Amino acid sequence: MGTGPVRRGSGQGMPAKGDRSAEREVPAGGVGHSAVLGKQDGPGGKSDSAARRSTAILFLPPASGRWLAKRHLAEGATVLYDVSRSYYEGRHCPLAVFGHSRDGKKGKPIIVYGVLSDRAGRPLAVDVYAGNTADPTTLPDQVAKLRRRFGLSRVVLVGDRGLLTQTQIDQLRQHPGLGWISALRSGSIRELVAGGYLPLSLFDEQNLAEIRSPDYPGERLIACYNPLLADQRRRKREELLAATEKELERIAAEVKRRTRTPLTADQIGLKLGRVLNRYKVGKHFATEMADGVFAWSRREESIQREAALDGLYVIRSSEKKRACRRPTRCAAIRA
């Protein structure tokens, strides 16, 4: 991601068939550098079995993007986009900075990278960003790439609810021909239920239903219920609650034991914060603390309110029903 050599082809950016000597070594550098993924040709112009199984990262000129788009994408195509992060070993990459790490590696700089793929999951392009870049802010780059570099005017972009936030969707609306498929966050789903637009009785006899809400004009909302996911979430939540309670009991026991030099409220708060940050279910507990005093209890109402949405998710899409004539588009909306 910064200093290593990569292979680059001649001509329009793709290796000439039968001419392995056309490949040359070039340094990979530059802030926010892009890469596109392409197949390597085998000797004699025909891809041998090893080459067919391998995919090389090629740093190519923009013209090669049109070649890939022509091969794997078409007008109206569905494209998938996601972002991940990785810690970085080294000190010379300008993109490696401290940010929100998901690797659990403390004290390491990280990089952010976004992968764009076709509807079959074949990666088409990779963009690398500074480690302190927020995931949603990478989306405008992908829109520009699809429009200008890939030369597509009609595309449906699929991303998770952390990427396609309401702010990003509002920006996508400004691009005619650009559609999206994403999902609602739990808070938005709760508002639909409270407003009567998503009655839970819908799922007494079915697991899939299309609903409407004035809060999402011109969008399709497809509510889904997965009983297996519901059981999994209930089981995981109970395990996290039990693990948290075990740690809270330890804190309470220590506070009770420290009679000669009682723990201060600040000291108790530090211990409590570490526990709640570890298991992420602090919203389900009520706590009370003072110098030498600590008490806690479950917020049963909060737990029941969250449990009511277990296994429930809502897909939001700009695509109309007529666009679902293509089976792959239907599968993307229902996935």
Image (cartoon, helix red, strand yellow):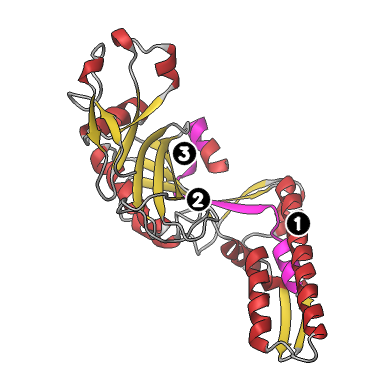
Q: In front here: 142 or 130?
A: 130
Q: Amino acid at mark 2?
A: Asp
Q: Residues within 10 Å of mark 1 (few under 14, many from 20)?
A: some
Pointer 3 residue? 322
Pointer 1 residue? 234
Q: In front here: 325 or 141?
A: 141
Position above or below: 42 against 157: above
Give coordinates of residue 134: x percent, y percent. Answer: 41, 59
- What's the residue at 76%, 88% (across, down)? 293
Q: Is residue 298 left or right of residue 93?
A: right
| Label of residue 160 in the image | 2
Which corner quadrant holds the C terminus?
top right
Residue 335 is one of the magenta-drawn residues: no
Position above or below: 258 against 136: below
| Label of residue 109 in the image | none
Residue 74 is at least partly visible in this image: no
Q: Amino acid at mark 1?
A: Arg
Which corner quadrant holds the N terminus?
top left
Dividing the picture into quarters, in which one does residue 292 lie? bottom right
> Rounded to the nearest whole Å, what is the CA distance between mark 2 and mark 3?
23 Å
Position above or below: 319 against 26: below
Identify the element where label 3 is drawn. helix
